[in-house]
Image (tube, rainbow, N blue to C red):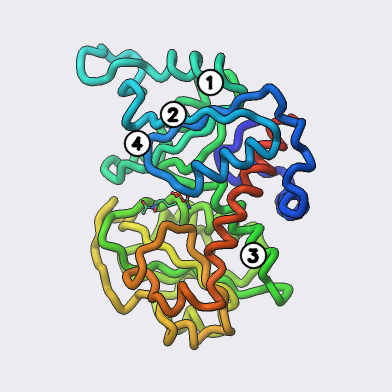
Amino acid sequence: MNYLSINNIDNLSEWVNEAIEIKNNPLKYQDIGKNKTIGLLFFNNSLRTRLSTQKAAMNLGMEPIVMNFGSEGWALEFEDGTVMDQGKSEHVKEAAQVISQFCDVIAIRAFASLIDKEEDLAEEVLTAFAKYATVPVVNMESSVGHPLQALADAITLEENKTVHKPKVVLSWAPHPKALPHAVANSFIEMMQKQDVEFVITHPKGYELNPEVVKKSKVEYDQDKAFANADFIYTKNWSSFKDYGKVISQDKNWMITADKMEKTNNAKFMHCLPVRRNVVVADEVLDSENSIVIEQANNRTYAAQIVLKKILED
Ligand code: AN0
Ligand code: CP
């Protein structure tokens, strides 16, 4: 079994509840991964994903080995039939099979290039590893999704909701750099599977992939979207239409205390890392309603339930 997207979750409410049980007793299954190795391959930076996935593996008795592929690995070729006389030293065909001999699970982080839309949509790196590896593969943020984050988000919502069907708002916020769509995509897919009133809000031009958004409600007026919200989930992303471009940095979209006033005393969520006073004002991030630290903590239990299911498979 692979964990490439949240569609690999066979029973969402069961996984969320089991993750919460594991959170209360993280070492309950400490022998299940004994003598097993997980290899974490990073083509991009990370704090939470790197440490929480290692922690999750350790809680299950597994040994993690970590490689910063982006800076320390051979530059990989992904295309079939290429004459490799340029910069790439090794083909993913060999790399994935070789790593599979050292590891019982391979986890990969490879962000979107934000240059070539078709290549990004094909999740070239993740797909190639899933194809050539002979062991299960876990997505630690690909060019289209971040399913470990989305599972942690579902756990955090379950723990923090006070009404049966909360209103959850995904709000775009400004950012100086072009960021990927992965976190927003997986969060949207996760909300589509939950019993919530879900609204996406962003400036015109920041429409996400229609194949992901589907029939989810989009409200271009951020104030209207925030009315009566129980959760504000904030994330910047670059344009999808004008692929990878920062088309506006409208400061009026930053999350402030004034905006949170319009909600139903909403909890504030963000996957982190977050730029203070650009994406969200200090007054919100430091408020009692901010649950970002617990949200990050839940990354361990999201990874732990995923690894447990893979080990049991
Ligand atoms: C990345 C992103 O937006 O996809 C990782 C978030 C988990 N964020 C940055 O690069 C700042
Ligand atoms: N939220 C998240 O994935 O954080 P990192 O990029 O630090 O791993």
- Work out whether mark 3 precedes mark 4 in sequence or the reverse, and give the earlier one: 4
Under circle 4, the secondary element is helix
Residue pictured at 61% horizontal, 48% vertical: 300
- Element on which disc 3 rests: helix
Asked which secondary structure carries label 2, the reply is strand
- Looking at the image, residue 274 sits to the left or right of residue 310; the answer is left
Label pair 1/2, CB-CB below 8 angstroms: no
Are dots 3 and 4 in contact, CB under 8 Å? no
Answer above or below: position of 81 versus 195: above
The residue carrying mark 2 is 67
Considering only order in the chain, which callout, 2 or 3, is on the residue closer to the N terminus? Answer: 2
Q: Quadrant of residue 277?
A: bottom left
Q: Which mark is residue 281?
A: none
215, above or below 44, in the image: below
Q: Is residue 219 left or right of residue 20?
A: left
Is residue 79 found left or right of 168 in the rendered image? left
As measured in the structure, the alpha-carbon distance from the residue carrying label 1 to the one carrying label 4 is: 20 Å
Q: Circle 1 sits on which residue?
A: 133
Q: Which residue is mark 4?
A: 119
- Residue at image coords 39%, 72%: 280
Q: Amino acid at mark 3?
A: Leu
- Mark 3 highlights which residue? 157
